[in-house]
Amino acid sequence: MGVHLAVGFQDTAPPKAGVENPGFDKSKICHSPVRVDVMHGFIFVNLDPDAKPMDDCFPGVRDEVVAFVPHIADLKPLEWVEIPENCN
């Protein structure tokens, strides 16, 4: 499955006390498409917009993974960690 995703900045920055916030000029910000493939819950991102889909490059890999890990659909994260960052 190939999905295209636009990656870029928000249209405007959130207001911050004491800082002038004119926003962003959308015409000066490039939103680049990237190729995204999802396989068994894993997300694969390819920054080459002309790249072939993963299924073309690795035919049969989805079935091979299921043959190697038959219960892959039942797997859950062992641990989830969120680290808040002060950015944008």
Image (spheres, rainbow, N blue to C red):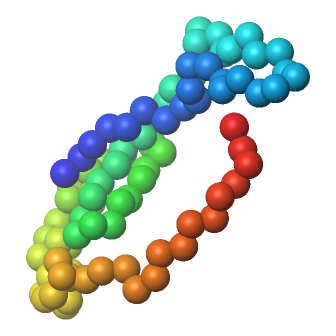
Residue shown at 72%/44% (left/top)? 87
State which quadrant residue 74 falls in. Answer: bottom left
Taking the image as drawn, is residue 50 in sight?
A: no
Q: Who's the residue at 46% across and 82% down the image? A: 79
Work out whether residue 47 or residue 58 is closer to the camera in this orientation and state it: 47
Residue 3 placement, left or right of 47 = left
Provide residue 54's location: percent of width, then percent of height: 27, 57
Residue extending furthest toward the right: 18
The residue at 32%/38% (across/down) is 4
* Residue ranking furthest to the front: 17
* Residue 55: image location, x then y, percent: 20, 59
Q: Do we see residue 65 in this rendering? A: yes
Residue 51 sits above or below residue 54 on the image = above
Q: Which quadrant would the C terminus be assigned to in this image?
A: top right
Q: Residue at x 40, y 86 (%)?
A: 78
Q: Nearer the viewer, residue 2 or 84?
A: 84
Left or right placement of residue 40 versus residue 28 in this view: left
